[in-house]
Amino acid sequence: MNYHEFLLYATRRLKLKFTVIEFCVRSFLRKHNLTPRTIECYLLWDGRRGYCQNISKQLNIDDNTVWRHLQKLEVVCPELFVEAVAIPEIPQMYFPDKSEWEEIERLNQIKEVF
């Protein structure tokens, strides 16, 4: 995934206009003295320290440059570099429509809160 694809993904995921996402990401990068290449390095990084050489080959840059990009990002967003974090499954909320509420009430399936 490259920087542009990342912006497109964020646009779809956040359901905002592309220009809004692009402005927010560029502002974040500028504020922290990062570049779009930093995001590309992170997107290709798989959590292993020796993986910088593979990233450097894919992006045609020096592996020390990749490592510097990742280090800068780690200073700004250390939570992105925490390994083996268990993300709990969040159940989806169910919101019945009017006819479903009527059916639930008819079947006496509403529990009272004491």
Image (cartoon, rainbow, N blue to C red):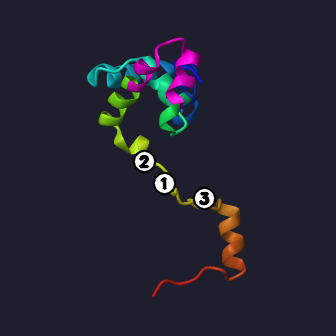
Q: Amino acid at mark 3?
A: Gln
Alpha carbon distance from label 1 to label 2: 7 Å
Residue 86 coordinates in the image, percent (x, y): 51, 58
Q: Is residue 40 left or right of residue 35?
A: right
Q: Is residue 3 left or right of residue 74?
A: right
As helix, strand or loop, the secondary structure at mark 3 comes to loop
Assign the magenta stretch its main secondary structure: helix
Q: Amino acid at mark 1?
A: Val
- Would you say the residues marked 1 and 2 are in contact, meaning their CB atoms lie under 8 Å apart? yes
- Residue 95 vs 47, above or below: the answer is below
Front label number (2 vs 3) = 2
Q: Which residue is mark 1?
A: 85
User: Which is nearer the eye, 4 or 78?
Assistant: 78
Residue 7 coordinates in the image, percent (x, y): 52, 23
Q: Residue at x 65, y 68 (%)?
A: 101
Q: On residue 92, which mark appears? A: 3
User: Which is nearer the eye, 33 or 71?
Assistant: 71
Residue 39 coordinates in the image, percent (x, y): 46, 25
Residue range of the region highlighted in magenta in the rendering: 51-67
First-in-chain label (2 vs 3): 2
Q: Residue at x 47, y 36 (%)?
A: 49
Alpha carbon distance from label 2 to label 3: 26 Å
Specify the farthest residue to the bottom: 114
Q: Which residue is mark 2?
A: 82
- Residue 38 vs 15, above or below: the answer is above
* The quadrant where residue 108 appears: bottom right
